[in-house]
Each structure stands twice: as structure tokens, then as C-alpha cells.
Image: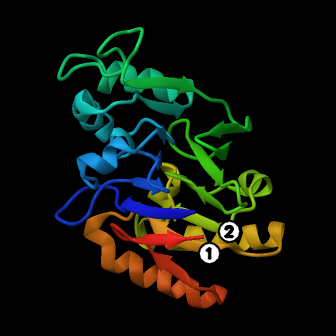
Amino acid sequence: MKIRILGAHSSETEGQRMASLLVDGILALDAGGLTSSLSLLEQQKVRAILLTHHHFDHTRDLVTLGANGAVFPNPVDVYAFSHTLDIVNSCLLDGKMYADFSKWPSEEKPFLRLNAIEPFQRQNIQGYDVYPVPLQHAVPCLGFQVTSKDGKSLFYTGDTGPGLKECWQQVSPQLLMIEVSGINRSQDFLRSVGHLSAGLLKEELMQFRQIKGYLPRIIVIHIPPPFQKDVEQEVKEISRELGIDIDIGYEDMEITL
């Protein structure tokens, strides 16, 4: 399994893109920085997209992928909570600012095929075992454990706040890709809106290790660009305190499991 980080941030600046991962060139997790990272040929290879939730920094490039899809030979399947799909349909693919690519070129054969999924219901998507698990966020949000045919697995949280005990009981990944969306001095605010600081992440990782008896490889993403250096330093501190390596994700970083 080869994972490429397309977007490792919560907003966009030069060289920093919004949340999106790509597994083996065909399965995308979130679409914040999907088309802004890929050539047309690479975009044509994407067969499915898993959306954690409806926020703009995780869904934006559905529109630009759809616009490019006029020259693509095959449709793309999009999987998410029905709540997520309802909002994406009404606010992003509403046909007002651009075409509704969930109904284009026709309602019978759209380019973006929207598929509702439910928590804890495993699905085979493009040959991967996909296991959706609900997370703690300001809106309904799913994390995804994705397992390849040879047993390699990652768990991607998208956005999440503290309170992941039940989630940790459900998953056993080799790679955990998890957010840190702010700095420790904003911890109370982050908790209130369903995000993690480095300090809150430390608590969740300690609980993971207590429940599972190990910690997987950990990569931190969804970093706000204005606080990049602060987050890096605070993650380095918790890495030292936990006695483990925690990597900071970055655009076009590639990981092989």
C-alpha cells in the first residue's frame, strides 16, 4: 500500500493544500486538495473518494474533479454519511455556481456517483476493506480504516476532537493519520469545536496504547499554516514524552506500508 499526502493542512497557501490523501493512486480520502495536487492523467486514475464529513477543506475539489471529468472515461464513486452527502449536494453540487456533477452529464449516468455509508458497516471499495468509524467532531464525521488485500492498514481520522476511546476499540491500524488543528494554548477552544491540539493528541494516544497494547506509526496532518512551527514543536514534545516517533505530514509525502 502506497499513501501519498495530497493536502496536509486545514487551509491553503503556496505549497500547502487542504486535506486529502491518495492510496495506490486510485482511492482518495477527502478531496480538499485533490485536483490541485494531481495531473489530469493522475486524476483519471482516481476511482473512488471517501469523505469524512462535509466541511469545505475536505470536499472542495469535488467540483474541480467534476469539471475535469468531461474528458475522463469513467465515473467516480463518492462514499460518505448520508448527512454529508445531503450538505454536499445542497451547498457544493447545487448547480448554482457550477454544474452539479452528481447529475451531469445525466441523472442516469452522472460523473460523481454518490453512495451513502453507515458506521461499522464494512465495504469492499476498489478492492480495499473499508471500515467507517464515527468520530468526535462539530458535525457528523467518519474516520476510515482502509486495509489492502495483503493486510496493510491505515486509519485516517479526518477531523476529530478528544474522546476516541470507542473508536480505538474498533481499529488496529499499522499507520494512524490524525489531525492537530491548533496549538496547546487554544486547547479549550479546540476541544469545544471537535479538534485536537498536541496535548489533547497525547491523551488520546496514551489511551490507544492502554487499550490496544501498542502504538502504530503516527503522522500528524490538518495543520493550520499560521501555526505550522508551533504545532511542529509541540508535537515534538509529546513525541519525546511518549517515547515514540511522530511524523509531521507534508504535501506529496509518500508512505509505503
Quarter of the image for residue 62 reads: top left
Which residue is found at the position 53% from the left and 33% from the top?
Answer: 79
- Per the image, label 2 sits on a secondary structure element best described as loop
- Per the image, label 1 sits on a secondary structure element best described as strand
Which residue is found at the position 60% from the left and 65% from the top?
Answer: 176
Residue 195 pos. (x, y %) = 49, 55
The reply to whether residue 14 is visible in this rendering is yes
Q: Classify mark 2: residues with Cα within 10 Å, few (<14), some (14-19) or many (20+).
A: some
Mark 1 and mark 2 residues within 8 Å of each other at the beta carbon: yes
Which residue is found at the position 48% from the left and 31% from the top?
Answer: 77
Residue 97 pos. (x, y %) = 17, 22
Quadrant assignment for the N terminus: bottom right
Q: Is residue 205 above or below residue 244?
A: above
Residue 81 pos. (x, y %) = 56, 30
Marks 1/2: CA–CA distance: 6 Å
97 on left or right of 250: left
Quarter of the image for residue 251 reads: bottom left
Give the amino acid at mark 1.
Arg
The reply to whether residue 34 is visible in this rendering is no
| Mark 1 or 2, nearer chain start | 2
Q: Which residue is mark 2?
A: 174
Q: Classify mark 1: residues with Cα within 10 Å, few (<14), some (14-19) or many (20+).
A: some
253 on left or right of 187: left
Q: Which residue is mark 1?
A: 217
Residue 45 pos. (x, y %) = 39, 45
38 on left or right of 151: left
Give the amino acid at mark 2.
Gln
Please tell me which residue lies in front, 216 or 101.
Answer: 101
Q: Is residue 246 above or below residue 124?
A: below
